[in-house]
Image: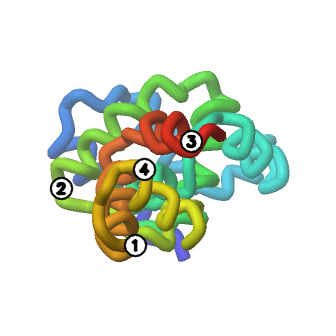
Amino acid sequence: MFENMKKIQQKSFAASLFLSTSIVTLAASSPALAQDGYSEDQTNFSFAESGYSYCDAKLVGAVYGWDAVDGKTFIGASILYDDGEQIPSLLAESRQLGNTCSFADSSYSYYDAERISDLWNLGDVGRAKSKIANMVTGGERDQIIEALGY
């Protein structure tokens, strides 16, 4: 599944001069990284404890042509390798490339969308779902969390 990953990473590195060489080394070793000493469970736990969302994983994965699962593994492994400071730059790059998340990627429920619609006077749930998706894509989850009281 990751046979072209090194080529993708090298192209991404050339296009993104702000990425460090440690990112390329980390990413070129494959998102699974089990051969480098970290298991899938360890990278998944690291991701789960990181504060990053499924949408963030989807956005990071999209930079490299991966899915959200591989994005989660990459984020978790980056943190385990003390290279997590690269994630905000990758998220910014992904947004600049036009990658987005849908409401389904947001982890919020229909009930949450109903509440946001009411709280922000958006008129209907569809508009609230769209607003939530845009905010989650833009890294503005804190405003949603605050509004919902979570």
Residue 120 appears anywhere in the view: yes
Question: For numbered disc 1, what is the local secondary structure?
Answer: helix
What's the CA distance linking mark 1 and mark 4?
Answer: 11 Å
Q: Residues within 10 Å of mark 2 (few under 14, many from 20)?
A: few
Find disc 4 in the rendering and name its residue: 119
The amino acid type of the residue labelled 4 equals Leu
Find disc 2 in the rendering and name its residue: 97
What's the CA distance linking mark 2 and mark 1?
Answer: 28 Å
Q: Nearer the viewer, residue 45 or 111?
A: 111
Q: Earlier in the sequence, mark 1 or mark 4?
A: 4
Labels 1 and 4 touching (C-beta < 8 A): no
Count of numbered labels shown in the rendering: 4
Q: Earlier in the sequence, mark 2 or mark 1?
A: 2
Q: Mark 4 or mark 3: which is in front?
A: 4
Q: Nearer the viewer, residue 138 or 15?
A: 138
User: Which residue sits at x=29%, y=50%?
Assistant: 10
Vertical arrangement, residue 106 with respect to residue 74, above or below: below
What's the CA distance linking mark 3 and mark 1?
Answer: 25 Å
Q: Earlier in the sequence, mark 4 or mark 3?
A: 3
Find disc 3 in the rendering and name its residue: 52
Q: Mark 3 or mark 1: which is in front?
A: 1
Find disc 1 in the rendering and name its residue: 125
Position of residue 58 in the picture relative to residue 40 (left or right): left
